[in-house]
């Protein structure tokens, strides 16, 4: 069954109308429940207040009757008529239970009392109890099945001690309640727990029951059970259904008309145009001769086909130039707002035409897909890649630092120019890279494209295939890429070595530790110094594997040499100090080669500490807890804070050789060295002076109470096989002089 757009629209609007009708019915259920709850609370509060008001009104009426009867009882002329008056009074006030005028003897005991019992029994009455009454006292009581409300007070008669008692039915106020509310009540329970009055028609299991307490809850307790007139679902439904259904039908009809004229008819026309543009044949079964309108699935397929052709390269599946330029424009807008930097990289593949002539176009297409896969795997999630033309690709890279960009571009270059294997054959590609950076090289997309293109042209005519845009007077440094590759090969093929320069105690002439220095095994093959190579490794995220190699080589040397108490000093890079996994890396090699932590001395430069003091302090503290000895190298060349110097778990401080080398002839250097030694000793640190190249320098350092010395005067860096001979010499002749 095929669902066309018109039928779907009608079903959609009808379903929405039905949904709204069901939603309205559900809202009625919620509304009925809430209204009944609110009505029950309000109804109970109102009736309870009304009952309390009627009870108070009854008390006031009883007081008025008392004062009326009191007036008659106090009048001497009316006293003989009082009993006659009562007979008529009972007839006119049936709610009055009894009126008693109690007399007392000389001892204050009652001598007269009505036959009808009241709340105050004769044994409970004494004339003296009423002398202090300022106002009549109202009380309530229960006598058998009767609840009474009684008022009592003295009568001021000449020479007689009298007390007037007026009793009435406590629940007489319910008669007025019936006349006000129209609710007929019946007394259904009378027990020790109290009295119950139910409204006629109230069943035993009724859920719409409202209970209102009556009485004073002390001597007379009771409950009033009334029927709550609740709202029902069908009652609300019958009142509102006609209006709701009419509104839903009218709204649905109006929506269908609007959909047809504003959406359905234009959409049908657009569908046919999309089918023709996508190159699909007319849908339908020609054998049956029935033409079917395109349904939503066919419309979706046609749209996807057009979208793919508009946004994607048909060979590689990458974004095309239209999408890439939109991404670039968005990136530049974001960069202007947030200050982010982006690099545009244009990649030109060479030799595709020759491949097509020699092997066929299918080989070229497969090769392009393989290149596209390699590019996507080399990029980060925030980067974008697109294919512009037959042999031209473009990359949009977010730039954090220039050294990171260099590393990423090199990684991408290697993924492109590697040997590709297709259909059992191997193909080598040549590629040229042109790079321009926003906003250093250009502030808008047009200029950025132009400058990247200029760099690409220059790459095609230069020895190095990766070129960054530069002004006419600028020079592009590409030597780093070849050095990085050389260093990577050196680590992988063990083309590096460590040499060791001793650090000697000035007091005992014992070797404290050996500082490990990195060297090429074959210096003649490398024109660039190892120090410059290490700096490039730091800039291109290659320092971690290099540091791992140095740590492992040092631990292996300590494990293999049979020298008691030997310790090796290792210089760490700033990048290592910001790696919270550095202690874990070091611990791995210590365990592997069974080396004690105290046999490794970590040397860090003063300037490295100040890059991010808090993070470096945490890492060094962890190393200190592990038991490694820590030393600050090249002290005096940076701007270390004394606060951090005090907080760091450092044991040694090494004075930079730029101050030590000329200290015998330069008073300023001598002053700096002396102050540094005193400062270190104040902080309970040992001092190492490096760059000691003469006996006079060594003597001056001894006079300043320097702890350790290092330099060519003590020893040049030793090869690994020379270390054992160095330790076999118990006293170093060059350091021994008379008088010391």
Image: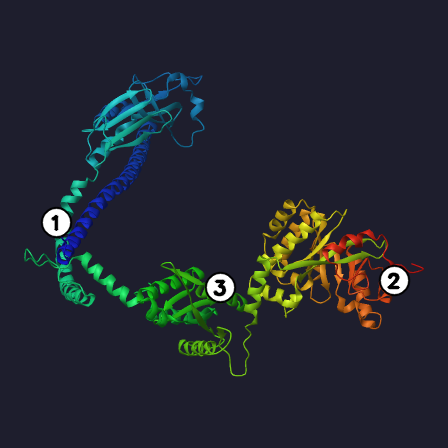
**In this picture, residue 11 sits left or right of residue 309:** left
SS at badge 3: helix
Residue for point 37% across, 21% down: 120
Which callout, 2 or 1, points at the residue further toward the start of the chain?
1
Which callout, 3 or 1, points at the residue further toward the start of the chain?
1
Q: CA distance from mark 3 to mark 1?
A: 73 Å
Q: Does residue 626 lie above or below 319 as drawn?
A: above
Point out the image quarter for the C terminus. bottom right
SS at badge 1: helix
Q: CA distance from mark 2 to mark 3?
A: 55 Å
Residue 493 seen in this snapshot? yes
Q: Does residue 594 lie above or below 62 as drawn?
A: below
Looking at the picture, how far across and down is residue 180, in whole percent?
21, 37
Look at the numbered discs 2 and 1 and tell me whether their residues touch, using CB distance below 8 Å.
Answer: no
| Residue located beneath label 1 in the image | 242
Mark 1, Cα crowd under 10 Å, few <14 / some 14-19 / many 20+, is: few
Observer-nearest of 153 and 170: 170
Look at the numbered discs 2 and 3 and tell me whether their residues touch, using CB distance below 8 Å.
Answer: no
Quarter residue 336 falls in: bottom left
| Residue located beneath label 2 in the image | 703
Mark 3, Cα crowd under 10 Å, few <14 / some 14-19 / many 20+, is: some
Which callout, 2 or 3, points at the residue further toward the start of the chain?
3
Observer-nearest of 160 and 204: 204
| Residue located beneath label 3 in the image | 411
Q: CA distance from mark 2 to mark 1?
A: 110 Å
Looking at the picture, how far across and down is residue 406, in whole percent?
52, 68
SS at badge 2: helix
Q: Label for residue 545?
A: none
Look at the numbered discs 3 and 1 and tell me whether their residues touch, using CB distance below 8 Å.
Answer: no
């Amino acid at each position: 069954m095929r669902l066309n757009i018109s039928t779907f629209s009608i079903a959609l609007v009808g379903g929405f109308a039905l949904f709204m009708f069901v939603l309205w019915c559900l809202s009625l259920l919620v509304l009925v429940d809430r209204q009944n709850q609110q009505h029950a609370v309000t109804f109970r509060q109102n009736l309870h207040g009304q009952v309390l008001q009627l009870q108070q009104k009854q008390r006031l009426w009883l007081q008025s009757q008392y004062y009326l009867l009191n007036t008659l009882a106090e009048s001497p002329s009316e006293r003989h008529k009082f009993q006659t008056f009562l007979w008529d009074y009972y007839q006119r006030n049936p709610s009055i239970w009894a009126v008693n005028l109690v007399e007392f003897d000389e001892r204050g005991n009652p001598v007269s009392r009505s036959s009808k019992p009241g709340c105050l029994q004769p044994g409970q009455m004494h004339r003296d109890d009423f002398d202090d009454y300022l106002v009549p006292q109202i009380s309530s009581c229960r006598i058998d099945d009767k609840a009474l409300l009684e008022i009592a007070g003295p009568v001021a008669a000449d020479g007689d001690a009298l007390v007037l008692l007026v009793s009435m039915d406590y629940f007489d106020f319910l008669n007025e309640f019936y006349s006000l509310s129209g609710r007929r009540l019946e007394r259904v329970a009378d027990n020790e727990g109290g009295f119950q009055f139910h409204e006629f028609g109230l069943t035993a299991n009724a859920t719409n029951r409202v209970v209102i307490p009556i009485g004073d809850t002390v001597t007379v307790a009771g409950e009033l059970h009334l029927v709550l007139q609740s709202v029902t679902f069908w009652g609300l439904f019958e009142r509102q259904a006609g209006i709701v259904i009419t509104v839903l039908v009218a709204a649905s009809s109006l929506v269908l008309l609007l959909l047809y004229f504003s959406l359905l008819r234009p959409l049908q026309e657009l569908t046919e145009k999309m089918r023709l543009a996508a190159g699909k044949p007319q849908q339908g079964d020609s054998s049956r001769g029935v033409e079917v309108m395109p349904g939503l699935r066919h419309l979706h397929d046609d749209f996807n086909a057009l979208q793919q052709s508009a946004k994607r390269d048909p060979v590689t599946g990458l974004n095309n130039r239209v999408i890439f330029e939109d991404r670039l424009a968005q990136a530049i807008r974001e960069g202007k707002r947030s200050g982010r930097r982006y690099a545009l990289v244009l990649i030109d593949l060479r030799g595709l035409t020759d491949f097509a002539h020699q092997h066929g176009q299918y080989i070229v297409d497969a090769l392009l897909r393989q290149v596209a896969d390699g590019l996507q795997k080399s990029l980060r999630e925030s980067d974008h890649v697109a294919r512009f033309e037959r042999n031209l690709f473009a990359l949009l890279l977010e730039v954090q630092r220039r050294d990171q960009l260099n590393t990423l571009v090199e990684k991408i270059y290697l993924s492109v120019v590697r040997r590709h294997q297709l259909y059992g054959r191997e193909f080598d590609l040549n590629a040229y890279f042109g790079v321009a950076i926003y906003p250093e090289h250009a502030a808008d997309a047009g200029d950025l494209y132009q400058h990247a293109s200029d760099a690409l042209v220059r790459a095609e005519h230069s020895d190095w295939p990766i070129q960054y845009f530069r002004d006419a007077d600028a020079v592009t440094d590409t030597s780093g890429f070849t050095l990085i590759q050389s260093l990577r090969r050196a680590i992988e093929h063990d083309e590096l070595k460590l040499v060791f320069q001793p650090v000697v105690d000035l007091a005992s002439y014992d070797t404290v530790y050996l500082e490990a220095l990195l060297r090429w095994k074959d210096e003649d093959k490398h024109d660039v110094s190892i120090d410059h190579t290490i700096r490039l490794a730091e800039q291109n995220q290659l320092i971690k594997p290099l540091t791992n190699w140095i740590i492992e080589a040092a631990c292996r040397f300590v494990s293999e040499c049979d020298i008691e108490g030997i310790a090796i000093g290792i210089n760490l890079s700033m990048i290592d100090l910001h790696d919270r996994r550095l202690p874990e890396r070091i611990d791995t090699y210590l365990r592997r080669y069974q080396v004690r932590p105290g046999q490794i001395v970590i040397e860090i430069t003063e300037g490295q500490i100040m890059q991010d003091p808090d993070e470096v302090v945490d890492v060094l503290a962890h190393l200190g807890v592990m038991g490694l000895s820590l030393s600050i190298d090249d002290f005096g060349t940076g701007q270390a804070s004394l606060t951090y110097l005090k907080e760091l778990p450092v044991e040694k401080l090494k004075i930079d050789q730029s101050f030590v080398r000329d200290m015998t002839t330069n008073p300023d250097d001598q002053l700096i060295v002396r102050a540094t030694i005193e400062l270190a000793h104040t902080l309970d640190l040992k001092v190492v002076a490096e760059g000691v190249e003469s006996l006079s320098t060594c003597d001056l350092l001894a006079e300043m109470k320097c702890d350790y010395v290092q330099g060519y005067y003590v020893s040049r860096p030793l090869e690994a096989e020379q270390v054992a001979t160095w330790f076999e010499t118990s006293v170093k002749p060059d350091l021994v002089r008379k008088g010391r």
